[in-house]
Amino acid sequence: MSESDPAGPLEGVTVVEAGSMISIGTVGRLLADFGADVIKIEHPTMGDHLREFGPQADGVGLWWKYLGRNKRSVTLDISTPAGKAVFEDLVAEADALIENFRPGTLERWGVGYETLAQANPGLVMLRLSGFGQTGPYSDRPGFGTLAEAMSGFAYLNGHPDREPLLPPTGLADGIAAMFSTMAVAFALYNRDANDGGGQYIDTSLIEPILSLIGPQPLRYDQLDEIEARSGNRSTSSAPRNVYETGDGRAVAISASAQPIAERVFEAIERPELIEDPRFLDNERRLEHVDALDEILQDWIGEHSRAEVIEQFEAHEATIAPIYNIADIFADPHYQARESIVEIPDDQLGSGMVQNTVPRFSETPGHISHLGPPLGAHNQAVYGERLGYDREMLAELEADGVI
C-alpha cells in the first residue's frame, strides 16, 4: 500500500499466502483489499496456477489479475532446504499464514504449524483444504467442484427432470474463502484483544457450502424428507421464478409476503387474483404454483423487459432483470456506487474489476494494483524486509530457490 492509499482496518497486519488457485487466493485478496500486507509465495518456475487458469488477455491471466490484486508476489520453492529456511524467516515476522496445500504437505517439508509456532507463538495459521485436516477423506485432493457435489448443493440445484447442476464459477471456493477470512479476523482479534495467542484454523471446502443450504439437516432429521430440485422455483415461497419477456429477455420475481404478492397481481393488471382462493396466502400459492406461473408468464411474455420492470416498479412489486456482465457495466446503480472500477496496470494498461465490499465509513478498502508479475517483489521482501544481501539473493536465485 502506498502512502496515498487510505488505511484499511487491517493496516499493519502481515499475511503470508502459500498455495494456489481460487480459494486461498480469495482469502488473500479479501485481506489485502482491507489493508493487510499480503506476501504471496509462488513457485519460481510455475507461479500460481491461476496465472494459466481461465481467460487470458495477450497471455496475461485475468483470474490472477483479479485475485492477485493488492498483493506482493515473491518466488520461493519451499520444498528445498534453503527454501524452507526462507519460508521460516518470512513466517516468523508474520501475523498470519494462509495455505491450501493438501494436508501433510507442509509437515513433509518440515514447516508444519507446531514448528512455525515455536518461532512465532502469535501466529494465526489458516489451513484450507478440500476435506479438512482430519477425517477419512482428508488426504484426498479436493477442488470446489467436488465440494459443490458432496455438500448437497448440486443435488438441490437445477430442474427436477434434469441432472444435478454445478455452478459455472468457483462457488464453493468463494464461500470457503469468506468463512476463512472471517476466521482469520476472529483469531487475530482473539490474539490481540484477549491475549489469546496464536492458533491454527482448519477449513474444508465442503463444510462452508454445506452450512448455506439452509435447514436441510433439520428437515431430514425431523421430517425424514430430502428436498428435490425445483428449478428456479422455491419450495418455500411463490411466486418465485424466472420469466421470459416479450423481447426475449428475462426477469426474476420473488413475492412470498402477502402484500408483495398483491402488488404483483396489481402490476400484471389482475387485481381480482388478490381474492382468488388459490392465491390468498403463500401456502395456497405454493399449492397452485403451476397456475400462478402460467398467469405471470402470459402477461410478462406480452411486454418488453423495460415495460415489465417499469410496471412492477410503479406498483412497488419486487422484480429484477436477469443481467449479464455487459448489463452490469451499463446499469446506473452499479455506476453510481462504483461497483466496478478501473485500475491502472503495467501489463493490461488498465483493467475493470469489482470494487471492495463491504463499504467502511472510516477505514475503507482500496485497490492499489492488480495482480503483479511473478516475483515482482522479491527485492522488496527478501532484501528490504528480511535483510538478505545481494550475494545471498543471487545465490538463492541461481539455485532455483527463488
Image: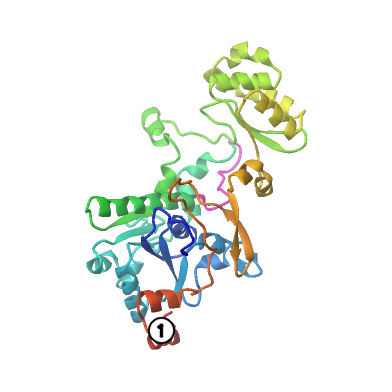
Please determine whether, in this image, residue 34 is positioned above or below residue 318.
below
Say whether residue 400 is visible.
yes
The residue at the point 38 percent across, 33 percent down is: 218
Q: Where is residue 384 in the image (x, y as percent from the top left)?
A: 39, 76
User: Mark 1 highlights which residue?
Assistant: 393
Locate the C terminus by quadrant: bottom left
* Highlighted magenta segment, given as a residue range: 160-171
In the orientation shown, which residue stands out farthest toward the front?
A: 4
Q: Residues within 10 Å of mark 1 (few under 14, many from 20)?
A: some
**Front residue of 361 and 267:** 361
Say whether residue 109 is visible.
no
Is 122 contained in the magenta span? no
Q: Position of residue 374 (x, y in %)?
A: 51, 73
The residue at the point 44 percent across, 55 percent down is: 34
Please determine whether, in this image, residue 100 is positioned above or below residue 215.
below
Could you say whether the residue bearing mark 1 is in a helix, strand or loop? helix
Q: Where is residue 37 in the image (x, y as percent from the top left)?
A: 41, 63
113 sits to left or right of 353:
left
337 sits to left or right of 90:
right
